[in-house]
Image (spheres, rainbow, N blue to C red):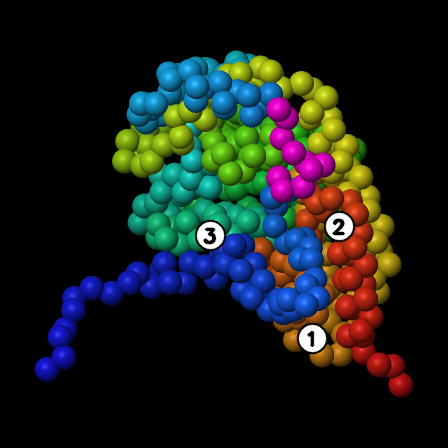
Amino acid sequence: MEQKWNFKPSSTLLDASSLSVRGVLTRIMGHIETDTNNPKPVIPLGHGDPSAFPCFSTTPSAVDAVANALRSGKFNSYAPCVGVASARKAIAEYMSQDLPYTLLPDDIYLTNGCSQAIEIITSVLARSGANILLPKPGYLFYEARAVFNGVETRYFDLVPEKGWEVDLDGLAALSDENTVAMVIVNPGNPCGNVFSYEHLAKVAETAKKLGIFVIADEVYGHLTFGSNKFVPMGVFSSTVPVITLGSISKRWVVPGWRLGWIATHDSNDILKRAKVVDSIKNYLDISTDPATFIQGAIPDLIANTNEDFFLKTVETLKTTADICYNKLKEIKCITCPSKPEGSMFVMVNLDLSQLGDIKDDLDFCCKLAKEESVIILPGCTVGFKNWLRITHAIEPSSLEDGLDKLKSFCKRHAKQMN
């Protein structure tokens, strides 16, 4: 008789990779054909990690801050679950520079990158029947974590013709008495947009009317190079409670250091009275912490980073965004609704009617990887089927090469006209 076992895997976890950028990119990478005699360089236009490219290297002062913290011997112990006090203070002061009020260290909670911050917030919101409003297109990690926690997800549109602004009427129509929060990502992933002050004010007023708080994903904060400057959602905390998620990953170009944070902007103590703050603390009591020596480096990392480093990063992103936008305009089957103004990405529409043997955006990306060794993220991964998300945060010469190969691929697969 065959032995019977009582355990089996979680079906939710088995399906989780379908909502994962990493999972989809790994699948696409699997289509690259390796030729040891004539290897093609892989051009990564699908992910948001430019740290491997010299033009996006982090500043030496950040490396020194980590090395000094490690060598000091002061950060070898367990950290408090909410984070090292000096790091929380430094981040509170850093964020307060852009706010009309001063954040306190007790408003800051340190996390293993922004991904863990998302995990914590979606867990805090989890209750029977709750739903959360997410942007479409958007970063589907929010959906993956919400689904895992039993929270229903509903999607409001970002309107391409309006610079990817939130469809506020559509957002309001989605809400009911079980809606707990909405998410905005600014500067935008995957759209490369930057919301204006005026639009953010309207978002805050809409959220107030709906009785929900705003989760502001600002991991790309300050990475702006267009007409709109970065405005943190916390500016509007007197109107609506705001929880900001951030990290050092993007602005300092160190995603592997895994240091993020949750910041509560609670001018009217609404989050405290609703015990959201207590829930965050309680979650941190039973979760993992960022490496203590990275936390210990934060005060010096922030204080000693020269403004020239930030300006150089933004200028490089502006250059690569210009290259990307101009070259994409040369490709007939691709339409770019607006020039990217922030973050590291641009969303473009794929006109399959002009292509002869491409089924959908995923098929397009798999065949592009196989034929050209160029990796692009299909729009279905961010909730926009038959669109593409392209990152321009790589070396300019590699970006030009990759976009030229994309153009050649599209020409090769163009429908033959009679």
Q: Is residue 56 above or below residue 59?
A: below
User: Pointer 1: what residue?
Assistant: 358
Alpha-carbon span between mark 3 and mark 2 = 32 Å
Please, what secondary structure does the residue beneath circle 1 have? loop
State which tag comes first along the sequence, 3 or 1.
Answer: 3
- Residue drawn at 62 percent across, 30 percent down: 58
Alpha-carbon span between mark 3 and mark 1 = 28 Å
Alpha-carbon span between mark 1 and mark 2 = 25 Å
User: Pointer 3: what residue?
Assistant: 143
Q: Is residue 47 above or below residue 282?
A: below
- Residue drawn at 80 percent across, 52 percent down: 400
Q: Main secondary structure of the magenta part?
A: helix
State which tag comes first along the sequence, 3 or 2.
Answer: 3
> Quarter-wise, where is residue 80 in the image?
top left
Q: Crowding at label 2, few (<14), some or many (≥20) Cα neighbours within 10 Å?
A: some
* Apparent side of residue 23 relative to residue 185 in the rendered image (left or right): left
* Apparent side of residue 147 relative to residue 9 in the rendered image (left or right): right
Image x and y of residue 362, in percent: 61, 67
Furthest residue toward left: 1
- Residue drawn at 38 percent across, 39 percent down: 120
Q: Crowding at label 3, few (<14), some or many (≥20) Cα neighbours within 10 Å?
A: many
Residue contact at pointers 3 and 1, CB within 8 angstroms: no
Residue contact at pointers 3 and 2, CB within 8 angstroms: no
Near-viewer residue (383 or 73): 73
How many numbered marks are there?
Answer: 3
Amino acid of disc 1: Ile
The quadrant of the image that shows the C terminus is: bottom right
Segment colored magenta: 51-60
Image x and y of residue 9, in percent: 28, 63
User: Pointer 2: what residue?
Assistant: 398
Amino acid of disc 3: Glu
State which tag comes first along the sequence, 1 or 2.
Answer: 1
